[in-house]
Image (cartoon, grey):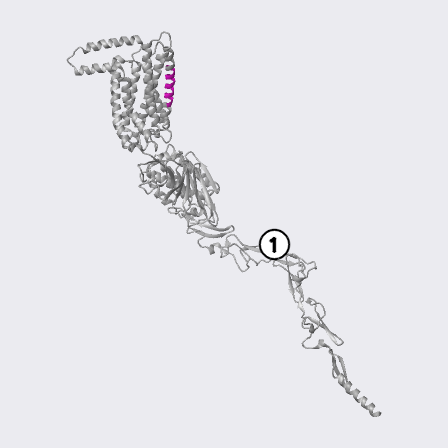
């Protein structure tokens, strides 16, 4: 039994030792002497750390657990067996931390911080803070640091930022005046740009910036910061020597030179406020004096005048105080534009006068050299087109065209000195003086053409209608628009008709004059009127035949035009007297004749008064470049057509009354049929004569227009046969005159018969008796 107990005890001890040698997880075996036991194992002391970084390890009996530090995730307990790792929480994103205005949220490991944006500082003065502490970011004035912008610059604080501005007369090397980089520094413009004052100026620093002091012969027009420009007054004087031959230009040349020389002085009165405007008005006044009464010089003087105008406009432009200036005088109209600035102006500009527009680009007006300003000007002349309506000999013509200026003459100029060949053409829009569909040509005044003449080189017509013409030119000068006229004088058939018909008319008129003067049997008041009518027509047609085309002498041509004006008017006045005489014969019973003194006064005095007044008002209207007649283009022709229309109306009035009275007398109880038939015949003859002569001048209105060749033929034929008509109406159709012609011819053909004198005497006595009985001496048809 004892042995069995001991055996059981041995087996139990063996089993006990085996169990202690294998401790469960979280425990470790502990042996003390012969004693072995399992005790708790502290996993948190293991190396490396069992929970990893950013985590705390908490030991428990037989186990442990991990807990992430604040600001890390996960937030629950875990062990290494879970495979979890503590990771940082981005509070700025995940938790939408609001740091307030002008502040940024910055995430950190295990937390975050708020920082102010550049240019701001926290209200507690610390660089970092947390949300919810009531701290705000306020503006920071960085300009409190005097060294932030350096010398020669001022600091300007802005909300959250700052900038520096260079002082007047200073700038960065890059050319800028504003900067924010503290490493930049402002330098004097005199040191940066050695050419800032030009070749003729010296740069100095002043409290208002830099100042250009001009040397002798240079000027900056009173603007101290502008480049000094050389004034070539000596060149102006030498180029104007040609104008000294004309006394009218002497005053204008002297005016220009004196003002040019005055600008060389820095204290010139022209630099004062309003000096440019006063100089402009004085120049326009001097120009008015030159153009008053019409420009009388030749083409050299015209070139000199245009040259002076261009230079004066360039000289005056920079002196004007306003960017746009308009002035008008008796003979001119001008508009000037001026742009100042550190950089050249850009874009288009438009200058206009009452009938012309000038359009271009500012870069064209500036050119390759910018002097601190750019000017543009347009000057329109009033009435100069009449004086320059010639000098067309350098223009190519087709179909023997003649030309006439149909626009205002203008001078366009800019501050650019190189305008002979512009890269961008300028445009000029001209309103026509006469609305017509004739062909129009854009021209300019070229002083290189033998002293000066109109030329179309470099100018093209963009578009044209009956109202206006648009021109595009690659240079600047003085411009105009020409109208091409149709020259009918070169038509061979018309010339042939004139040279054949007019001599025939002159022969017939001469026969009429001799007949009315020598044949005593027909002497009467009406015969006297016919005599002077034929004399007026004879002189008029003779002068027309020999002098109408003699235009080489202007004075002689004007005299021819005046003579034609006078005698053609006289012929209408004598026809009017015939109408008055017929009226008196029908209406009045006694004293039906007109006194010769009254007829002479009316027939020759009235035309003399009209011609005298016309010559006084517009002497230049007599004679044109193409023919010696009244100027059609300027309306002067109405000094002829006006009186003619009035005379025709008066004559028609008298003829209507005469016909009415004749009708009454024919219907009376005891009409004097013989006498009434004579007056009726006289009236029909006078009306036919008035109709032919009146209709002739109606067609004469269209004589010098294009596409009216038929009108020209009718006018030429009627005018050439006017004398023949007078001979037929008043001589050939008169029985008394034919009898006198027969007697005269018979006396020549049969000189042996001596009874002609007696026969003639008897016939004359009978004729005079008939005249006394009828109270008239007129012939009947």
Mark 1 burial class by Cα count in 10 Å: few <14, some 14-19, many 20+:
few
Farthest-out residue, left: 752
Q: Secondary structure at mark 1?
A: loop
Q: Main secondary structure of the magenta part?
A: helix
In what quadrant of the picture does the C terminus appear? top left
61 to the left or right of 724: right
- Where residue 697 appears, as percent x and y from the top left, is 34, 25
Q: For mark 1, what is the residue?
A: 159
Q: Residue at x 32, y 12 (%)?
A: 677
Query: Is residue 724 shown in magenta?
Result: no
Residue 428 in percent (x, y) is at 41, 41
Q: Of 80 and 140, which appears nearest the observer?
A: 80
Q: Residue 15: percent from the left, percent from the top? A: 77, 86
Q: Position of residue 268 (x, y in %)?
A: 44, 43
Judge whether residue 649 is colored magenta: yes
Q: Provide the residue span drawn in magenta.
A: 645-658
């Amino acid at each position: 039994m004892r042995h069995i107990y001991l055996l059981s005890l041995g087996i139990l001890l063996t089993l006990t030792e085996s169990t202690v040698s294998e401790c469960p997880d979280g425990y470790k075996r502990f042996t003390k002497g012969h004693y072995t036991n399992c005790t708790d194992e502290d996993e948190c002391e293991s190396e490396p750390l069992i929970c990893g970084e950013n985590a705390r390890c908490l030991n428990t009996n037989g186990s442990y657990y991990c807990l992430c530090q604040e600001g890390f995730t996960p937030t629950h307990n875990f062990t290494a067996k879970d495979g979890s790792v503590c990771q940082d929480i981005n509070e700025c994103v995940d938790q939408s931390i609001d740091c307030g205005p002008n502040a940024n949220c910055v995430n950190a490991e295990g937390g975050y911080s708020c920082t102010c944006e550049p240019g701001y500082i926290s209200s507690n003065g610390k660089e970092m803070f947390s949300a919810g502490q009531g701290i705000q970011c306020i503006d920071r004035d960085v300009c409190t640091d005097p060294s932030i912008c350096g010398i020669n610059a001022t600091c300007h604080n802005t909300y959250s930022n700052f900038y520096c501005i260079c002082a007047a007369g200073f700038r960065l090397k890059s050319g800028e005046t504003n900067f924010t980089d503290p490493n930049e520094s402002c330098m004097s413009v005199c040191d940066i740009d050695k050419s800032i004052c030009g070749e003729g100026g010296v740069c100095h620093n002043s409290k208002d910036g830099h100042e250009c002091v001009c040397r002798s012969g240079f000027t900056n027009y009173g603007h101290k910061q502008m480049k000094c420009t050389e004034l070539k007054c000596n060149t102006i004087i030498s180029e104007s020597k040609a104008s000294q031959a004309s006394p009218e230009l002497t005053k204008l040349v002297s005016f220009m030179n004196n003002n040019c020389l005055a600008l060389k002085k820095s204290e010139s009165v022209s630099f004062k406020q309003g000096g440019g405007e006063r100089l402009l008005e004085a120049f326009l006044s001097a120009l008015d004096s030159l153009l008053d009464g019409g420009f009388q010089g030749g083409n050299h003087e015209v070139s000199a005048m245009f040259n002076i105008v261009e230079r004066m406009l360039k000289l005056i432009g920079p002196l004007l105080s306003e960017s746009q200036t308009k002035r008008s005088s008796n003979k001119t109209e001008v508009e000037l534009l001026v742009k100042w600035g550190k950089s050249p102006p850009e874009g288009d500009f438009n200058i206009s006068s009452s009938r012309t527009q000038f359009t271009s680009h500012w870069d064209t007006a500036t050119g390759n050299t910018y002097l601190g300003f750019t000017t543009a000007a347009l000057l329109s002349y009033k009435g100069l087109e009449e004086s320059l309506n010639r000098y067309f000999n350098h223009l190519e013509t087709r179909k023997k065209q003649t030309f006439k200026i149909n626009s205002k003459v203008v001078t366009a100029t800019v501050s650019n000195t190189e305008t002979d060949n512009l890269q961008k053409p300028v445009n000029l829009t001209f309103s026509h003086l006469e609305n017509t569909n004739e062909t129009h040509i854009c021209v300019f005044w070229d002083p290189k053409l033998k002293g000066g003449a109109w030329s179309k080189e470099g100018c093209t017509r963009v578009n044209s209608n009956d109202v206006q013409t648009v021109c595009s030119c690659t240079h600047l000068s003085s411009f105009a628009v020409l109208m091409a006229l149709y020259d009918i004088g070169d038509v061979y058939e018309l010339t042939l008709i004139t040279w054949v018909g007019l001599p025939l008319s002159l022969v017939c008129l001469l026969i009429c004059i001799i007949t009315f003067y020598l044949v005593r049997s027909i002497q009467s008041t009406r015969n006297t009127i016919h005599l002077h009518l034929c004399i007026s027509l004879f002189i008029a047609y003779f002068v027309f035949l020999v002098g109408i085309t003699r235009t080489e002498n202007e004075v002689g041509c004007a005299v021819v035009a005046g003579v034609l004006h006078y005698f053609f008017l006289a012929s209408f006045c004598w026809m009017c007297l015939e109408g008055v005489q017929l009226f008196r014969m029908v209406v009045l019973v006694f004293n039906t004749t007109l006194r010769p003194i009254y007829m002479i006064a009316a027939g020759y005095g009235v035309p003399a008064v009209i011609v005298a007044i016309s010559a006084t008002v517009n002497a230049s209207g007599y004679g044109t470049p193409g023919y010696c007649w009244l100027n059609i283009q300027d309306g002067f022709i109405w000094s002829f057509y006006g009186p003619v229309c009035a005379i025709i109306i008066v004559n028609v009035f008298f003829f209507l009354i005469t016909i009415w009275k004749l009708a009454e007398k024919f219907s009376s109880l005891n009409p004097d049929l013989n006498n009434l038939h004579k007056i009726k015949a006289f009236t029909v003859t006078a009306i036919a004569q008035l109709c032919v002569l009146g209709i002739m001048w109606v067609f004469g209105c269209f004589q010098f227009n294009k596409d009216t060749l038929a009108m020209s033929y009718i006018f030429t034929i009627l005018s050439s046969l006017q004398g023949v008509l007078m001979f037929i109406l008043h001589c050939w159709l008169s029985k008394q005159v034919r009898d006198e012609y027969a007697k005269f011819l018979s006396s020549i053909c049969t000189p042996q018969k001596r009874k002609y004198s007696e026969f003639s005497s008897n016939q004359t006595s009978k004729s005079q008796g008939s005249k006394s009985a009828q109270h008239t001496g007129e012939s009947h048809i």
